[in-house]
Image: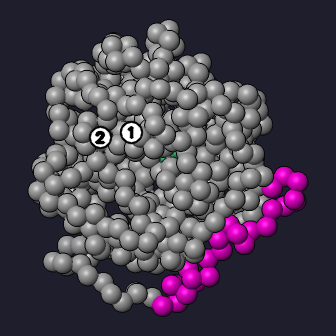
Amino acid sequence: MLKRVLVANRGEIAVRIIRECIDRNIETVAVYSTEDENALHVILADDSVCIGGPSPRDSYLNMDNLIEAALGKGCDGIHPGFGFLSENPEFAKLCKENGIKFIGPAPEVIEAMGNKAAARDMMIGAGVPVVPGSDGVLRDLEAAKVTAEKIGYPVLIKASSGGGGRGMRRVDSKDALERAFEEAAMEAETAFGDRTLYMEKLILSPRHIEVQVLGDAYGNVVHLGERNCSIQRKNQKMLEEAPAFGLDGETREALCRAAVKAAKVSNYEGAGTVEFVLDGDNKFYFIEMNTRIQVEHPVTEMITGVNIVGEQLKIAAGLPLSFTQEDVRFKGHALECRICAERPLENFAPSPGKVDFVHFPGGNGVRVESALHSGSNVSPYYDSMAGKIITYGDTRIEAVRKMRRALGEMIIRGIETTLSFQYMILYNKAFLRGDYTTAFMEENAKDIIDILKTADDIEITEDINADDLKAAEHVKTSDDIKPANDKERIL
Ligand code: ADP
């Protein structure tokens, strides 16, 4: 096993990783910016190093300072978490050159998947379906015009180095193309220092379904099933669940098989996520692979019993996967709400500030992943996510009820959050039916906002529609879904 791991991150994911290391008797070194001096991850780690000023560029993105801290503290591993340098091939390479194990895939794999246009090509080669679109990157506006005519409007222009929804533009007609192209290129340049773009057909009202995979250094790859992450604002996830409700066995199996193929073709090592959009006819298309731990990994942990961060640490230590696909069992249903410091009534604008008081929920089937405590600070310098609440139940409706209880019990004073908004989602008909798509917000946010505007203190004790709830009560868990054949047991 690794002996001493530097956690190159902050917030709840740094806390999640440090706790995992403590459980495995691995020493930890936290890093922090001057803004994070009193943060929980610093308190929990065995040792800590200040790596710079508040701006991410000066601290959590400062490769030289991170490597220096790791070498100075005698670390044999670096866990990058998510965001920051987690998908930066240069950083992974730098770790390697300094004899430190980067907990994630090889730099070449990160690079190959980080270029989303090239990753598309790789998937086409491997026979994994991709959304119809450009062959590689768009050379110029003219090429964009030709591609859009070929695949048909509406289209989506995307940044090759994209992430976090930046550099992405929907284009509905020829007239709007030039402006969107320029805007997307500019946004991509600012955010990623790379203005290259590619194009995909816009799949109307798809579901965002992703598959968790694990690969070891010996070519073994397993999947841990899928998650539905279709409830998004600004193309970013808000509420996730596993398994994806309403997905038929055949589609699920094909999706998971495609994800394993994607991981195998890229010689994947570590934990990764293969993302797809699924259209109304249950046709699915690869959109990207994230080569890191994902925010929503706990829902998969809850239904499989596999400790994904634990597996990352074992794989990084050179151990082979200790289980096969056939050993993976799915049980029950899990939900996750990302509680963000944002103002839902002002188009989810960030709402950083000091948390005067926080009370977290608990009890059976409730898991909290957060770095918040009373008196701590949600900094304007970093991501707005303040924590995650995860619930687990034998059935979907049980997980929903537990989430209602959990969010109802949680108190955060001092900053505005998305908590009430997510609480209302838990009573929304489309959500309860489980057949929602990425159009959920477009179709439902206004109603939810209207309720939030009128209610001083939202307290709902009555279920809004008994029939919808009844439908949700009869949710299939993955236990009910039979594998297509016993030999290749997917579920
Ligand atoms: P990013 O890496 O910037 O988050 P993704 O490629 O993962 O971008 O896409 C983010 C979200 O945008 C997806 O979850 C999905 O909701 C939507 N999306 C992406 N590609 C398409 C597409 N071709 N058609 C429809 N929606 C899409």
- Does 303 sit left or right of 359 as displayed? right
Which residue is disc 2 drawn over?
Answer: 44
Check if residue 468 falls in the magenta segment: yes
SS at mark 2 in the image: helix
Of the residues shown, which amino acid type is indicated by label 2?
A: Leu
Percent coordinates x, y for residue 426 in the rendering: 41, 73
Q: Residue at x 67, y 35 (%)?
A: 215
Identify the magenta region: 466-489
| Picture quadrant where residue 165 is located | top left
SS at mark 1 in the image: helix
| Picture quadrant where residue 460 is located | bottom left
Relative to 365, residue 343 above or below = above
Percent coordinates x, y for residue 296 in the rendering: 47, 51
Q: Residue at x 57, y 83 (%)?
A: 473
Percent coordinates x, y for residue 28 in the rendering: 37, 31
Please state, as top left, top right, bottom left or bottom right, where the C terminus lies in the image.
bottom right
Specify few, some or many for label 2: CA neighbours under 10 Å numbering under 14, 14-19, or 20 or more: some
Q: Nearer the viewer, residue 334 or 316?
A: 316
Which residue is disc 1 drawn over?
Answer: 18
Please state, as top left, top right, bottom left or bottom right, where the N terminus lies in the image.
top right
Q: Is residue 479 visible?
A: yes
Of callouts 1 and 2, which one flags the residue occurring earlier in the amino acid sequence? 1
Q: Residue at x 58, y 34 (%)?
A: 314
Specify few, some or many for label 1: CA neighbours under 10 Å numbering under 14, 14-19, or 20 or more: many
Relative to 409, residue 178 above or below = above
